């Protein structure tokens, strides 16, 4: 046997026994090894390998993140596991009675209360798989949020909503096309939501794009045409993007109120359509009257 082969055999044997020893020894909070995602299921890191270098964004190898996006060090504690005894939400079965109808005012109060919890850093929703399973059989959302596709505007998070609490339609600058309008009709007529909230936001790139395209004539397309109505109605000024956004929210809400199914539900008192603004910096949602 060559010297190289002998050293390889010794290393393989040591690695095998070290792995078996670690598999038989419970891990402690100071000895964490994160699962490596593979095509055949989770496999633990090689115990003989050096610690992995984590990304600067705080992402762990399994895709989770450390609190507040802080970098994850090899000694970072693992997230608390969900034990078999953890209480799960009561599942909604096909035979379960539907909850009591929610009025438009109650639905709006729920959204604003959720946003308050979000701003204060005390959300009540963890978006755990237990909640997803509990609402798999049926849904009773109390709101439809029509908003922008901006990656910083996540309605379920900023309203601290759980699975089954709301339905969402997202397009660039919450511009309404045939698919968006049909989705609104479906939410109102079939799903029966009592509230439609049109949500604009600060620093909207779609609004800035529409302003530039309308003023210079360099941009075009459906998005610029739709937001362009609000742009042309808003005089120039340092806060023009904010004013255009607000005007566009009002116009979108007005368009929805004129939809036949929406108009009938509003007239019957079972639906409200309101506009709102989300501040990216403060995390706050304010109603636009």
Image: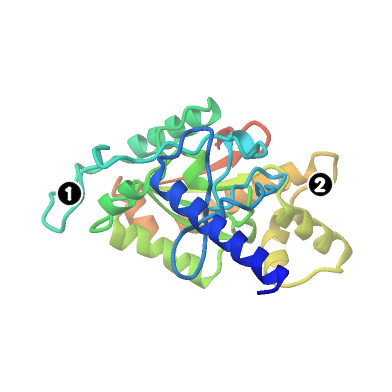
| Residue 254 against residue 112 in the figure, above or below | below
Q: Nearer the viewer, residue 185 or 128?
A: 128
- For the point 46% across and 34% down, the residue is 28
Determine the secondary structure under disc 1.
loop
Q: Earlier in the sequence, mark 1 or mark 2?
A: 1
Instruction: Note whether residue 71 is visible.
Output: yes
Q: Nearer the viewer, residue 200 or 83?
A: 83
Give percent across and percent down for residue 71. Answer: 67, 39
Question: What whole-number distance in Å separates the C-alpha atoms at marks 1 and 2?
Answer: 49 Å
The N terminus appears in which quarter of the rendering?
A: bottom right
Quarter where residue 76 is shown: top right
Closer mark to the observer between disc 1 and disc 2: 1
**Residue 44: image tag:** none
Q: Which residue is mark 1?
A: 98
* Residue 278 placement, left or right of 81: right
| Residue 96 against residue 106 in the figure, above or below | below
- For the point 20% across and 51% down, the residue is 92
Number of disc labels: 2
User: Pointer 1 and pointer 2: residues touching (CB < 8 Å)?
Assistant: no
The C terminus appears in which quarter of the rendering?
A: top right
Give percent across and percent down for residue 269. Answer: 30, 45
| Residue 116 against residue 240 in the figure, above or below | above
Please identify the residue farthest to the front as the structure is shown: 1
| Residue 28 against residue 95 in the figure, above or below | above
Instruction: Note whether residue 274 is visible.
Output: no
- For the point 66% across and 49% down, the residue is 52
Label 2 Cα crowd, 10 Å radius (few <14 / some 14-19 / many 20+): few
Q: Which residue is mark 2?
A: 235
Give percent across and percent down for residue 171. Answer: 58, 61
* Residue 49 placement, left or right of 224: left
Label 1 Cα crowd, 10 Å radius (few <14 / some 14-19 / many 20+): few
* Residue 228 placement, left or right of 100: right
């Amino acid at each position: 046997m060559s010297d190289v082969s002998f050293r390889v055999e010794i290393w393989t044997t040591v690695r095998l026994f070290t792995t078996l020893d670690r598999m038989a020894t419970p891990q402690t909070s100071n000895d964490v090894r994160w699962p490596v995602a593979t095509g055949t299921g989770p496999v633990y890191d090689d115990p003989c390998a050096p610690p992995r270098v984590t990304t600067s964004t705080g992402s762990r190898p399994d895709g989770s993140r450390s609190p507040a996006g802080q970098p994850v060090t090899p000694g970072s504690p693992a997230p608390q596991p969900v034990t078999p005894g953890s209480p799960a939400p009561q599942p909604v079965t096909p035979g379960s009675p539907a909850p009591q109808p929610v009025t438009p005012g109650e639905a709006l109060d729920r959204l604003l209360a959720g946003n308050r919890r979000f701003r204060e850093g005390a959300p009540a929703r963890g978006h755990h798989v237990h909640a997803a399973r509990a609402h798999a059989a049926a849904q009773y959302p109390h709101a439809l949020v029509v908003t922008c596709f901006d990656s910083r505007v996540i309605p379920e998070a900023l309203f601290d909503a759980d699975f089954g609490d709301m339905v969402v339609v997202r397009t660039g600058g919450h511009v309404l096309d045939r698919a968006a309008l049909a989705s609104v009709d479906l939410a109102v007529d079939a799903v029966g939501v009592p509230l439609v909230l049109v949500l604009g936001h600060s620093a909207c790139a779609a609004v800035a794009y529409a302003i530039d395209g309308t003023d210079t004539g360099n941009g075009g397309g459906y998005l610029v045409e739709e937001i362009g109505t609000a742009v042309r109605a808003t005089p120039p000024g340092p806060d023009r993007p904010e004013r255009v956004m607000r005007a566009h929210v009002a116009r979108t809400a007005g368009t929805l109120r004129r939809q036949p199914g929406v108009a009938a539900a509003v007239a019957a008192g079972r639906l409200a359509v309101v506009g709102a603004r989300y501040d990216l910096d403060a995390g706050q949602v304010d109603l636009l009257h």
